[in-house]
Amino acid sequence: MRRRLAVTLAILVTLSAVLTAVTWGQSGEYKIGVLEPLTGPLSGEGKRHLEGFEIVRDMINERGGVMGKKLTFTVADAPDPTAAASEATRLITREGVKIIAGTFSSRLCGAASEAAARANVIYWETSCVDPRFNKRGLKNVYRTEIDATGFGWYNIEFIVKHLAPRFNLKPNQLKIAFVSEDSSYGQGVTESARARAKELGLIEVAPPEYYNFTTINDMTPVIVKLKQLNPDVVHHIAFSNDAPLFWRQAREQNFQFKALVHAGATGYGGADFGKAMGHDGNGVFALLEPGPGFKLDSLKPEGQKIEKEFRDAVQKRTGSYPLGGHQLAGGGLWLLKLVLDKSQSDDPDKFRAAVMSLDLPVGTMINGWGVKFSETGQNSNERVQHYMLQWQNGQLVTVWPEEFTTNRAKWIPLGAWDSRK
Amino acid sequence: MDPARRLGLAQIDVVAQLGVSTVLLGGIYALIAVGLTLIFGIMRVVNFAHGEFLMLGMYLGFFAFTLLGLDPWFVLFVSIPLFFVVGALTYAVVMKGVIHASHNVQIFTTVGLSTALQNLALVLWSGDFHTVRPWHALTPVRVAGTAFNLSQVVAFVVAIGLTVLLFAFMRWTHTGRVMRATAQDREAAILMGIDTNRVYGLSFAIGIACVGAAGVLISPLYAVYPTAGLQFVLLSYVVVVLGGLGDIRGALIGSLIVAAVEVGGSYRFGTAWKEIFYFLLFIGVLVFRPAGLFGQRGAETLGV
């Protein structure tokens, strides 16, 4: 009996080894590592990013794949920085990948890319916005999304050019308060916005209020303080639990301000905020990739085509308009395809040469982006066009820059809490 | 006007609002901490999965509201027996085997349980952030220059009620006396004919019933997601140590102190400081009154 079992086992093992060898030999597949937080507090957005990657991977494969091969993923979970580094290392040493794409969060991208850089593997970041990411002199580390400096810059641009005139205030009369979660994402955006606000002469009512989003349980002390300081604009960078908490408690405390501006695909920019608040979320601004209202015909012809196909693919898979996570991951992966088309190699030097040679104007890619990388491996602020979206009756719609959209911003300034219908 | 000059505690309505916020936040912390202090005090087990039972309570509140349209206040009555059973089952399946084992084994077990529950929630219900918005969560109450939320007031009232009930139960019922006896000296309790296993099972079940109810009650106030428990659990250890291990009154007063430090510190010095303040308080208590403010002297080493 035991002998028979042993024989069966031996046969099974041999068979599976042969099968693996056969599939390996025939595959014609090109495998990259995809690293996202799929468990833990960041997993909501992490999974959305993975979904974006998968949608665009299928689009790429329908168009012949990369370097003549079918693009496949080895997915790894990175709930925290330690896991990000160890999983990146595992993808490289055990799975043998030459390119890693990921990791959405600024808490993770630093650690993950460091591990990739040590192994001389290409690291392709599609989302994290930590400004330090591309300032470490790492040659094979690239980021397709703009960094937090860009976010802060765009936000102040919007506040000064679009909001201030409608408040009948000059920039140097406009009072602004900064509230932010304290990860490198929040700090990066907030500090760059503060620097830009200072240049333009805005009045900062108090030092920025930083908090830890994983342990914040009550925003009333902050709100009570802000109420006394009476800012026109609240610049709040938040994650998905603290954004609804602040908004609900601000309403309870009847804290009246003229506008709230956020940046990024989480917190006020995430789908959960709209689900949580419905019409009560009306009026909040979030800097993002384009949402409903975005005019396809404002793009270049090739951009229109790919953007439309992307939207349809997301619609088919998720039943909704692309969300921020889909757009960042999807746009980033499509850009990786363009690079590989050009380099036809994952050799770091050839790859780098291809990245640097890409030069596409705004409006040619998914999200209406263009491409022009700097020597630091960073796609440029001017090419990665960003848009201001606003919550209007449970939907996040594009409202600025106005030439790109059919929608217009409402509730400027925000009226009483119960009048924003 | 110089904005900085207007900041200050001089304004009476600011003080009143901060006071109200402290009391209401303290109520939420107490709700979570009473269950923990019971388990901690009687079983001498650090239940690292406490926050995850809170999270399960929050999901119960969420699903009952979105799928069945049931108000969390109603679900509260269902949740207490339900989580009592969940607690008893968890004790029988997981905790019973390690109750006499070393602290390391117990810690590994409860941390394992915590991770397992978090990931179970993630697999079953995704990592999305959900919100429960019954009418009372949308109803601001304004009294004399202060504002708060009706759900919060009820959570506070229930916290007080629960604390009083548990306190009375522990003090005046036979079962309560048996539980206290077991907490004070396990060996002697066995010699007196007390079935300590049953006492532990009961304590765990009551503790989990409390935290489950807490989860349901706070579901309209905080986002519901798989790691929602982590938001509160570290803090409830501070509360429990501050109040004294196993002391239910202590848990209530400890909660109010922690909330006061958090609210006052956040207002005066900025939110970034709040954890520094209450952990300083925590260290201070450990140094000067290791048994906690109300704990029995030497209780911290009992049963170890």
Image (cartoon, coloured by chain):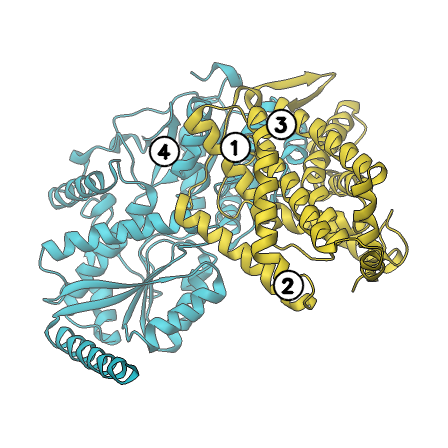
Chain colours: A cyan, B yellow
Look at 48% across and 57% down and name the residue there: A107
Are the two marked residues, 2 and 4, in contact with CB atoms closer than 8 angstroms? no
For residue B61, the mark is 1
Subunit under mark 3: A
Viewer-proximal residue, B216 or A84? B216
* Amino acid beneath label 1: Gly
Residue type, mark 2 in image: Val
* Chain assignment, label 4: A
Q: CA distance from mark 1 to mark 3?
A: 36 Å
> Label for residue A230?
3
Name the residue carrying label 2: B98
The secondary element bearing badge 2 is classed as: helix
- Element type at marker 1? helix
* Residue B179 coordinates in the image, percent (x, y): 79, 48
Mark nearest the camera among 3 and 4 is 4
Above or below residue A231? Residue A21 is: below
Q: CA distance from mark 2 to mark 4?
A: 53 Å
Residue B107 appears in the rendering: yes
The numbered mark at residue A301 is none
Write down the chain letter for disc 2: B
Residue that badge 4 annotates: A389
Callout 1: chain: B
